[in-house]
Image: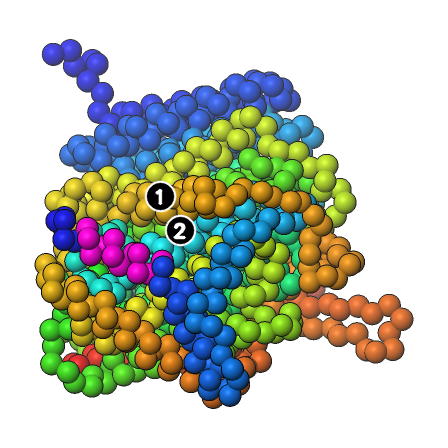
Amino acid sequence: MTAYSVLAQVLALLLAVLGAPLLTGWINQCRAWLQNRSAPPLLLPYRTLHKLFHKDSVIAENASPLFRIAPYIVFGVMVLACGIVPSLSTDLPLAPAADAIALVGLFAVARVFMSLAAMDIGTAFGTLGARREMLVGFLAEPALLMVLFTAAFMTQSTSLASIVETTASQEFAIVPSLAFAGVAFTMVSLAENARVPVDNPATHLELTMIHEAMILEYSGRHLALMEWAASLKLFAYSSIGLALFFPWGIAQVHDPVGLLLAAPALVLKLAIGGAGLALIETVSAKMRIFRVPEFLAGAFLLAVIGILVHFLLGA
Amino acid sequence: MDLSLQLLPIDGVLIAVGLWILVGAAGMVRPASFFLVARVLFPLGALVSLLLAIVAVAGLFTAPQVAVLPIGLPGLPFHLRLDALSAFFLFLLGAAGAGISIFASGYFRKGEGTPPGLLCLLYHLFVASMAMVMVADDAYVFMVMWELMALSSFFLVTANHTIPAIRRAGYLYLLIAHIGALGILLAFGVLQANTGDYTFANMRAQHLSPFWASTAFLLALFGFGAKAGMLPLHIWLPEAHPAAPSPVSALMSGVMLKTAIYGILRVGFEVLQTQLWWWGVLAIVLGLSTALFGVVFSAVQTDMKRLLAYSSIENIGLLLVGMGLALLFVGYGTSALAALALTAVLYHALNHAFFKSLLFLCTGAVLHATGERNLGKLGGLLRTMPWVGWLALVGALAAAGLPPLNGFVSEWLLLQSFLFTLGLPSTFVNMLLPVVAAGVALVAALGGYVMVKFFGVIFLGQPREPALARSHDAAFSERAGLVWLAAGCVLLGLFPVTVIALIDPVTRVLVGDGVGPKVAANGWLMLAPVAAERSSYSPLLFLLLVAASCALTFALVRRLYHGRIRRSPPWDCGYPLLNARMQDTAEGFGQPIRQVFEPFFRIDRHLPSPFDRHPVYRLSATDHVWHWVYLPVARAVEGLSRLVGLLQQGRISTYLMYSFVTLILMLLLVFR
């Protein structure tokens, strides 16, 4: 562990924690433009967070301590997730703590705590959200794992840093198995980040909610942490996608110049990716909840096909 | 050196077994004395378990020892042997059993069917017979102890024998246990290869042809599979586990199912000298179907103990997949990979013993506090039963396979052993393995769903019945047992390198290779079974990082803003009339799974019509296997016995005629 790697780690963490709301704001802005609305300010998510932190937390009388600690756990888990995904550099001191499989486990921890917190008050919408979230999760999680396995089979490593180092050093070529994995990953990311067509982040109709239904009872700083964690999750997923499929520009081991260049490269890639996400959201319609398993089973099968294609074609 | 004091680990095991039998027999001195049994004997039994666990750890690192007990038939003594494999499973029995016994000392109450003294005797015979199964070194003592285990557990399952449903469950259990025992007996018959010598040492010396080796393996897989709850022999498990008192369910699910795993490992890897790759494929396919079946059924259960029983079927399936993988690798001669897969299997067996015992004991505490096993009548117990609730959360998170608890480590290892399989000589197998890995990932994710349902419906939300508000937390000794098991879940999760050092000698016995040195090379903090740059996981670092970022966030939020909190009624989007009936029931929470996996179930649905004055909605989702396998067999047996019944007319003259005709036929045969 050198001073350089510590610096890279701290930079990556700071960029993730401070920049994640900006990514959310950017996507909202792009969405508004595409839908021919006048866009909210880019920095609106920060103002919302600031406002929420200032407010008193109103907590239901029958809430257990689990309800109050869940936002901290979810937030802490997402920070760690952003810390181990190689977004700026592959030389991260935290990375050996968790490889790709553990990263999926990390997201599962957040999901389970969020669902449990949603069931804690005992409202109809809370349990509805928890049930739906687990429904999405039980298919999205193995699909994500299979996407990561495709990369792991190709590079013979489940360490994200090694995967990125190996794929970034290869010549640019469209690898069939990665193409399958890429489609599957996009579908999983939409579902996991509560985006159209699976969930609608802007919905106001409780019966169609998934993510929002789970955090209905939260307010004040707890809600702020949950919202921030959702932004971090989107950031982490985007970083995983960029690291797996567009690894160019990520600094290698001990490469200070690369680290300097990596930050603008990441911002540029995220901006393009965010605009793409907004486009997908704009052109697709929200599905009925029972179409979601079919959608995710499709993603799961695509990812498995990706692995099989890798074995068949050797690429 | 004083030889009289030189005690080998195997002597320690025998002493522990003897002490258990003594403790059990002491219960019969005053069978009705509740004080003697609960406050004295069960804690003593727990101490003996602890002793066994310590002795077993010593046994892991010593050379195999044999002993011959001069009991049994003339010329047929008990051959016993303690090697690393036995020692590992004895450790599992001792470590998990200690927690269960302590809990049991607070659990058994007066006036529940069987008198406490008899329960105590049966309980300790049960644990003692399991210990003896694991040190048996000939088929004779193995089968005797196996039967003793089945019988003592049968009487424990039927402790509340006044309830007809429990008697029925016990009968089913006994039936399947004996069908399985027949399979095991036949397997031993094949293994001794006509030498007439039933010691395992002799069986190891035989080199069977592939046909006979496969026959022996298949019979053993059938026999042990019946005990483990492998598809389609699982049907006794969801009946017997809920019927038994909770400490017994915990022992059966946490430990007894592992004796079957022990049996498959012993016969498949150690006694049989050759392994064929297709055994592995068979075990993988059976295991994956068992796991998927178990977890899907688990998600739709409404009885909390049945839910856990199906979840045990799931975990047994995962263990079978791991063993199948190891068989495959041994069949192809790659013992390093086999060692990794077996490490995952043994680790998961240990983990399952801890978290499943913990969860079963928690259901026992809930059952005592509320008198209710139906998930639809529970809820909100985290507030009235904080000890049980928070410890159950640890167990549920471990069972859901979440880092940094123990369930995750073994699932991680299992997935890792799938990942480095490139270059097996068969394309078919190379294509099969990723698909199986996908199946395992799906099962693991569904396991999370089940555990959220289990914990959320019992402990969170509002109480679904008014009586639940009066429920009380577990007593001191019950808490102690739960804390012991929960601590095991946490420690097994946080220190995988140490645990793998315990498993290493076992895999060396089974496949002659181990991952211990490689793992130890990276230090105690980092788990990297293959190489650090290929895969690594550090649970302690993981926990510290999450805790640190939580604490930092908490401190920052408090410092920069404020810590004000207001309590108010739940918001619920402004709906004014909120009651406990609006929450998801267990059926409701499982409904998506029932819909997605509809072909798995045989669904019998009764929908009310719009004109019903008292609308009733009834739905039962049952098992196809029961209708496809067991009912046809039962009908065939009934038909055959009806044919036999035709002979029995009940008239003496007819019976005399049968004898006469038989005599004539015999005479014709002889004097032909």
Magenta residues, dominant SS class: helix
On the image, the x and y values in percent for residue B21 come to 44, 25
What's the residue type where badge 2 is placed?
Gly
Q: Which residues are magenta?
A: A6-17
Nearest the viewer among A27 and B210 is: A27
Residue identifier under label 1: B548
Q: Could you tell me which quadrant the C terminus of chain A lies in?
A: bottom left
Chain of the residue under the numbered disc 2 shown in the image = A
Residue identifier under label 2: A76
Q: Which mark is residue B443?
A: none
Per the model, the C-alpha gap separating discs 1 and 2 is 8 Å
Quadrant of the image occupied by residue A62? top right
Q: Is residue B666 above or below residue B570?
A: below
In magenta segment, residue B540: no
Q: Which residue is most to the top?
A: B2
Kindly indicate whether the residues beneath marks 1 and 2 are on one polypeptide chain.
no
Colour scheme of the picture: rainbow
What's the residue type where badge 1 is placed?
Ala
In magenta segment, residue A10: yes
Q: Is residue B644 above or below residue B380?
A: below
Circles 1, 2 touching at the beta carbon (< 8 Å) = yes
